């Protein structure tokens, strides 16, 4: 077997791309500052796993650093190594823990801090990758408080503490846990996890503690501890349910270009399966982005079974109005009903927005039967990518 070189980015030339992704860096910075104000005096880390939720860790991480963020979380050691190239002095925690003896050396080389999730992780970090060095090895200890995904049980964590007090092998810098239902503000699970975490964290004296993700940060100051770990809120996602407006500013705008506008008489059907038939003479705009670009097929106007079906599919923002997606989203193309717009209102090459400043990310996600996280992390690689660096940067 041969290892392949990294896949070069596809079509990012604006003249020949089907669409564009715009990342608003001042909005990202403003979101970080809002989270800092909300969490103070707790410190705010940046969660930049999965290529900063699809936005690009290379553009996101330096902005957070400039705003004073010094602690970062990634999911995988490979992401940690990539982040180390971008931020030589950051404190980088890796949520996945160790994969095996061979990964310990990579952690050491890039000075990554593993989040140790079970007893196997603890033994690996005690035994490997340190070539005879005897200083206690820094790490985070993850305690499961009810989600049953990653983490030691509270009993295991306390047993570790007693043993480590004798051996002195590890030097935990952080004790952390993760909320299962933080975005459901009324879930009794939040208080239960809080109490379980308090009981364990209070035993780790002199060690920082962390429980809250974006949603937890907005629950109650009792959830803040020393360090909060927001991801989605940085990128403009709505942190929790409830009637309050999303306090975060939109950061990502996804647009695609119109490649054809066609007149379809009443009774015509559109797209694969002919699942959508037009009840009036209609004008249909065909746009050059589809599910290969992250426009989930579940956004289809009709005909795709969903786990949590939504009545209508997604919408796009065209010339100051919302218009519906009609028929099935296809791999490279999506169809919009633009009948309500004037005859020449939309034409070849125009950009239409699928989410961003006009269509909220969370609404677009809900229309696809999914969540903001999945929509962002599935943004495809065929877009022209651009960043707004200041409020003065014009959006043409
Ligand atoms: C992804 C993740 C976060 C960030 O969660 P958001 O909901 O995006 O704020 C925080 N902590 C852990 C353990 C995570 O896996």
Image: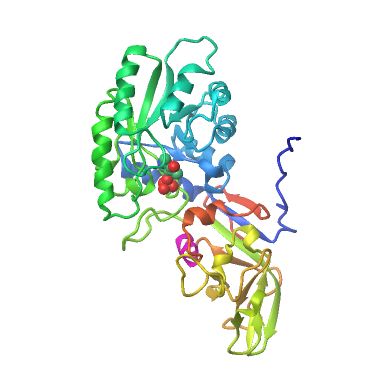
The x and y percentages for residue 77 are: 55, 32
Q: Which quadrant is the C terminus positioned in? A: bottom right
Q: Quadrant of ligand 1?
A: top left
Q: Is residue 13 left or right of residue 208?
A: right
The x and y percentages for residue 17 are: 71, 58
Q: Is residue 215 magenta?
A: no
The range drawn in magenta is: 361-367
Towards the viewer: 233 or 26: 233
Q: Residue at x 67, y 85 (%)?
A: 264
Q: Residue at x 59, y 90 (%)?
A: 280
Colouring rule applied to residues: rainbow
The x and y percentages for residue 181 are: 34, 51
Most common SS among magenta residues: helix
Towards the viewer: 220 or 163: 163
Q: Residue at x 48, y 39 (%)?
A: 64
Q: Residue at x 26, y 41 (%)?
A: 194
Relative height, residue 334 to residue 28 (above, below): below
Can you see residue 42?
A: yes
């Amino acid at each position: 077997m041969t290892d392949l070189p990294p896949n070069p980015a596809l079509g990012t030339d604006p003249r020949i791309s089907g669409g564009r992704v715009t990342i608003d860096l001042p909005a990202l910075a403003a979101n970080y500052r809002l989270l800092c104000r909300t969490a103070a005096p707790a410190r705010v880390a940046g969660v930049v796993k999965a290529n900063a939720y699809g936005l690009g860790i290379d553009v996101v991480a330096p902005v957070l650093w400039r705003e004073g963020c010094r602690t970062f979380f990634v999911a995988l050691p490979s992401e940690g190594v990539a982040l180390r190239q971008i931020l030589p002095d950051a404190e980088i925690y890796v949520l996945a823990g160790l994969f095996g003896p061979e990964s310990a050396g990579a952690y050491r080389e890039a000075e990554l801090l593993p989040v140790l999730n079970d007893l196997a992780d603890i033994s690996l970090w005690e035994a490997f990758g340190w070539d005879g060095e005897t200083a206690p090895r820094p790490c985070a200890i993850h305690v499961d408080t009810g989600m049953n995904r990653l983490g030691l049980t509270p009993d295991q964590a306390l047993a570790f503490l007693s043993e480590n007090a004798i051996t002195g092998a590890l030097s935990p810098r952080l004790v952390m846990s993760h909320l299962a239902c933080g975005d459901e503000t009324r879930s009794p699970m939040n208080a239960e996890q809080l109490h379980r975490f308090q009981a364990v964290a209070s035993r780790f004296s002199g060690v920082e503690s962390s429980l809250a993700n974006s949603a937890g940060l907005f629950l109650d100051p009792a959830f803040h501890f020393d360090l909060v770990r927001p991801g989605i809120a940085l990128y403009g996602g709505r942190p929790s349910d409830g009637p309050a407006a999303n306090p975060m500013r939109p950061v990502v705008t996804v647009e695609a270009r119109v490649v054809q506008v066609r007149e379809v008489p009443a009774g015509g059907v559109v797209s694969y399966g002919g699942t959508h038939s037009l009840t009036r003479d209609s004008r249909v705009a065909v746009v050059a982005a589809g599910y290969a670009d992250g426009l989930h097929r579940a956004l289809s106007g009709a005909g795709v079974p969903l786990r949590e079906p939504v009545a209508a599919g997604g919408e796009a923002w065209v010339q100051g109005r919302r218009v519906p997606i009609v028929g099935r989203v296809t791999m490279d193309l999506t169809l919009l009903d633009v009948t309500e717009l004037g005859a020449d209102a939309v034409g070849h090459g125009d950009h239409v927005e699928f989410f961003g400043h006009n269509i909220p990310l969370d609404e677009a996600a809900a229309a696809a039967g999914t969540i903001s996280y999945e929509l962002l992390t599935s943004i495809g690689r065929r877009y022209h990518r651009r960043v707004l660096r200041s409020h003065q940067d014009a959006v043409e």
